[in-house]
Amino acid sequence: MVRRAVIERTGAVLVERMGYALTGWERFRGLMLRKGLPPEEGLLIPDCRSVHTFFMRFPIDLIYLDAERRTVKIVPSKAPCRLSGCLRARSVLETAAGRAAEAGLQEGDRIIFCDISAI
């Protein structure tokens, strides 16, 4: 299932194609060893309060979401080989660096996930 992430307040598309890291291996690997992340793609890691960017080749935006998918923390352009966390978070959406600002995302914004395979 392919999903789109939309900012409820503005209707702006934050991520056109969102992947999921569900298994232990997918969660550990995340975006490691990829050459880059296109601006329209993102990765959602559910049940997650912290991430690392070890073995990554590019910076990413980290968007921490609470249980209602409200943005509780935005970390723009997190460099490779770093750690980040947010105790209030229940999931993390990883996007291309600069994407959160480009889409106008603000803390407190609710993110809606839309199934685009049905569109």
Image: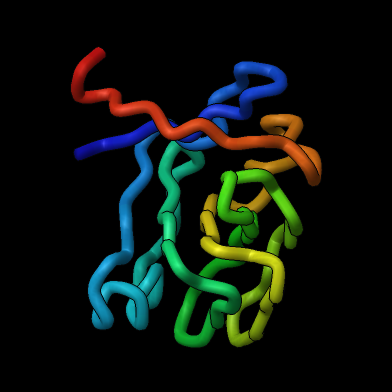
Relative vertical location of residue 108 with respect to residue 29 in this rendering, above or below:
above
Furthest residue in direction top, as rendered: 119
Is residue 18 left or right of 96 when viewed as pictured?
left
User: Residue 49 occupies which quadrant of the picture?
Assistant: bottom right
- Left or right of 52? Residue 16 is left
The image shows residue 53 at horizontal and vertical percentages of 54, 79
Residue at 71 percent across and 34 percent down: it is 102
Indicate the position of residue 36 as horizontal and vertical percent values.
43, 59
The residue sitting at 27% across, 81% down in the picture is: 24
Looking at the rendering, in which quadrant would you find the N terminus? top left
Q: Is 13 placed above or below 83 here? A: above
- In this rendered view, identify the residue nearer to me: 112 or 26: 112
Identify which residue is drawn at 79% across, 39% down.
106
Q: Is residue 23 left or right of residue 42?
A: left
Quadrant housing the C terminus: top left
Rendered image quadrant of residue 65: bottom right
Quadrant of the rendered image containing residue 80: bottom right
Provide residue 72's location: percent of width, then percent of height.
74, 55
In the image, residue 49 above or below residue 73: below
Q: Residue at x 27, y 73 (%)?
A: 26
Left or right position of 110 against 37 = right
User: What percent of the width, then of the height, locates residue 15?
Assistant: 48, 36
Task: Name above or below for residue 56 compared with residue 61.
Answer: below
In the image as oriented, which residue stretches furthest toward the front? 67
